[in-house]
């Protein structure tokens, strides 16, 4: 079964940047839509962004203009570039395949995620 491995998180000050990576264990060319999700302490997991194989994206409003997403099919890796980070971006970030541009995750399982902490 396909697996997702997230990495690149860390501790960053407000206003800083981080780039997350999501490595996929099968060819991403075969996956129509990929997505980043996050789960903040005490909250439900939420969609952050969906990106299709054609480059169409769907960001949640709170990250628009600050986050960008990309897919590298040669490396079977998806990236999330996060700029102008805010404390409310603190969460564990996960990736998964998405059923559509709306972001419903395809697989019922998750990787270990990567922790992002935005704090001074």
Image (cartoon, rainbow, N blue to C red):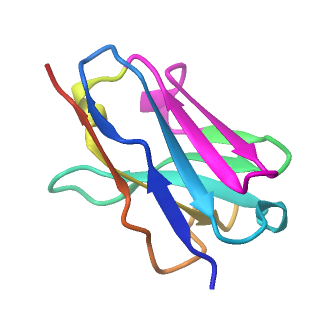
- Image height of 86 relative to 5, above or below: above
Q: Residue at x 64, y 41 (%)?
A: 58
Q: Which is more toward the observer, 52 or 11? A: 11
For the C terminus, give its image quadrant.
Answer: top left
State which quadrant residue 99 falls in.
Answer: bottom right
**Image position, residue 110 (x, y; %):** 44, 72
Q: Is residue 56 visible?
A: yes
Q: Is residue 102 visible?
A: no
- Image height of 23 relative to 116, above or below: below
Magenta segment includes 120: no
Magenta segment includes 82: yes
**Image position, residue 18 (x, y; %):** 42, 29
Query: How many dots with numbers?
Result: 0
Q: Residue at x 41, y 22 (%)?
A: 17
Q: Which residues are magenta?
A: 59-84
Q: Which is more toward the observer, 63 or 117? A: 117
């Amino acid at each position: 079964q396909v697996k997702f491995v997230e990495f690149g998180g860390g501790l960053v000050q407000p206003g800083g940047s981080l780039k997350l990576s999501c490595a996929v264990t099968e060819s991403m060319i075969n996956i129509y839509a990929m997505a980043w999700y996050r789960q903040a302490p005490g909250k439900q997991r939420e969609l952050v962004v969906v990106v299709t194989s054609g480059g169409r994206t769907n960001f949640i409003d709170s990250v628009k203009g600050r986050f960008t997403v990309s897919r590298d099919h040669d490396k079977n890796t998806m990236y999330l570039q996060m700029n102008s980070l805010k404390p409310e971006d603190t969460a564990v970030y996960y990736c998964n395949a998405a059923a559509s541009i709306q972001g419903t995750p395809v697989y019922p399982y998750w990787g270990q995620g990567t922790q992002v902490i935005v704090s001074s």
